[in-house]
Amino acid sequence: MSVSPITWPAKDFSRVPFSIYHDPAVYLDELDKIFHGPTWNYLALEAELPNPGDFITTLLGETSVIVSRDAEGRVHAFVNRCKHRGATLRREACGNAKSHTCIYHQWAYSLDGRLQSVPFAKGMKGEGGLPKDFDKSSIRLDMLTVEVYKGVVFASFSPAAEPLADYLGPAVIAELDRLFARKVKVLGYQRQRIFGNWKLYNDNVRDPNHGGLLHMFHATFGLYRLSQVGGAKMDGKHRHNITYNQLGSDDTADNAGYDGTTKVFQEGYQLLDKSMLEYKRDYPDMVSLVILSVFPSVVFQQIANSLCTRQIRPRGVDEVELYWTYFGYEDDSEEMTRHRLLQANLAGPGGYISMEDGEAVQLVHETSARAQAQHALVEIGGTGEIKDAKNLISEVPIRGFWSYYCELMGFEAGTPRNQARVVNQEAA
Ligand SMILES: [Fe+2]
């Protein structure tokens, strides 16, 4: 049941209704129209399933999905649910198998999701078993469309989804080409629960502005400052975003523009061991940080030499899980692998520069729940046209996220669903 009106009073999405983070009916609609809709969702890195028979289980929206490599090396994805009585087929996080067998009645499926065998299909002594006209070949697990780009496995539930390359667009493809030019190896995983709506995390990663303000470690030690060379690039539909910056491209004087009432970094702080800050150049360009957010459920991260994917898994209207997969490159030296593992401490649930994101999401979620007829204000970086920025003092990509979200959800901005009940003075 909707607890408050959902209104989009500004056509440029510079006002975001707080109720959008809390309405259980909207949440159910999102699972359908977004996660099961015409979007492409990150499932895994191919490096996680290198051999025939390798599989992993993951989530797309709230649906458990098996990613399975068959004997010929093809990657398939299907819903982790037996076609017989609906039981979860695989409970393991990963493994290697010749088939996928349900523990309930041992219906077995091939590595490409086809029903292979049913125990006692012919019954015993002419009694019981499946009917004679039962067509085993007509039964297959619910298949997703899979496309693999540079070793990254994406899938879609919807046959209406555009081709993956069109969905991502040239700017995102260029970033994936950069990040996945070399073969990757997985270094480890982290998981975390944040007590906030999944879209608040999407807001967070499309907000270059907060990076230099909330994350004091970042700003104090110079990994990311709003005064540095950087910006935000989007795809044609503004649904994806690339935030980037260059380490060492500013000096302390550049921060003079601040009015002194806020602290943009801790003066005088030093690290005795500076290896946590060291960027050993991985790519031909000078970019030392990339936060690439692909709508609706993945972030690709380069923070200095710390590389990972962050999968966004909605867990009800009030919770989101992040699944962090850290990786390096196959041809990394042992020393480089150690360096990446050290810098893995920058991100993740207790990361020096990402721990605060969970707290910020929770602060907004908790407090906005009590003001659901009001709206968030998104004007930093300008109102009106949604366009790329060549600086970091911008939250325009957040408006980009909402514009595509509303397109999929069928919300029309600028024409409140229930004009009479708009009570937020900012909406006028
Ligand atoms: Fe952040």
Image (cartoon, helix red, strand yellow):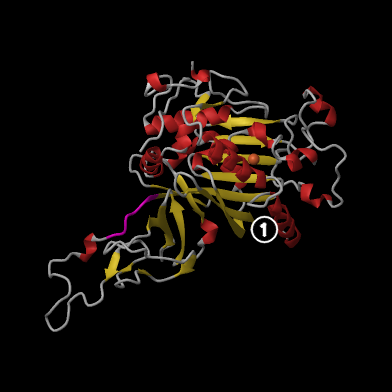
- The location of residue 231, given as percent across then percent down, is 65, 30
In front here: 303 or 85? Answer: 85
Left or right relative to 324: residue 280: right
Q: What residue type is labelled 1?
A: Asp
Quick check: 55 above or below 228?
below
Q: Does the residue labelled 1 lie within 8 Å of ligand 1?
A: no
Q: Does the magenta stretch include residue 142?
A: yes
Which residue lies most toward the top here?
A: 428
Secondary structure at numbered mark 1: loop
In which image quadrant can residue 358 be found? Answer: top right
Residue range in magenta is 140-145
Q: In this picture, is 372 found above or below 104?
A: above
Q: Tell me if residue 259 can be seen.
A: yes
Give the image location of residue 359, x and y in percent: 62, 44
Residue at 29% from the left image edge and 72% from the top image edge: 105
**Quadrant position of residue 124:** bottom left
Q: What secondary structure prevails in the magenta region? A: loop
Q: Mark 1 points at which residue?
A: 331
* Number of marks: 1
Residue that protrudes farthest toward the front in the picture: 370
Magenta stretch: residue 228 in it?
no
Q: Which residue lies furthest to the bottom in this view?
A: 125
Q: Where in the image, quadrant-wise, is ligand 1 located? A: top right
Residue 246 in the image, given as x and y percentages of width and height: 73, 36
Badge 1 crowding class, 10 Å Cα cut-off, few under 14, some 14 to 19, many 20 or more, is few
Horizontal side of residue 108 vs 348, given as left or right? left
Q: Is residue 237 visible?
A: no
Q: Where residue 1 sits: x, y (%)?
A: 35, 38
Quadrant of the image occupied by residue 221 = top right
Q: Is residue 398 above or below residue 282?
A: above
Viewer-closest of 102 and 146? 102
Relative to 255, residue 148 above or below: below
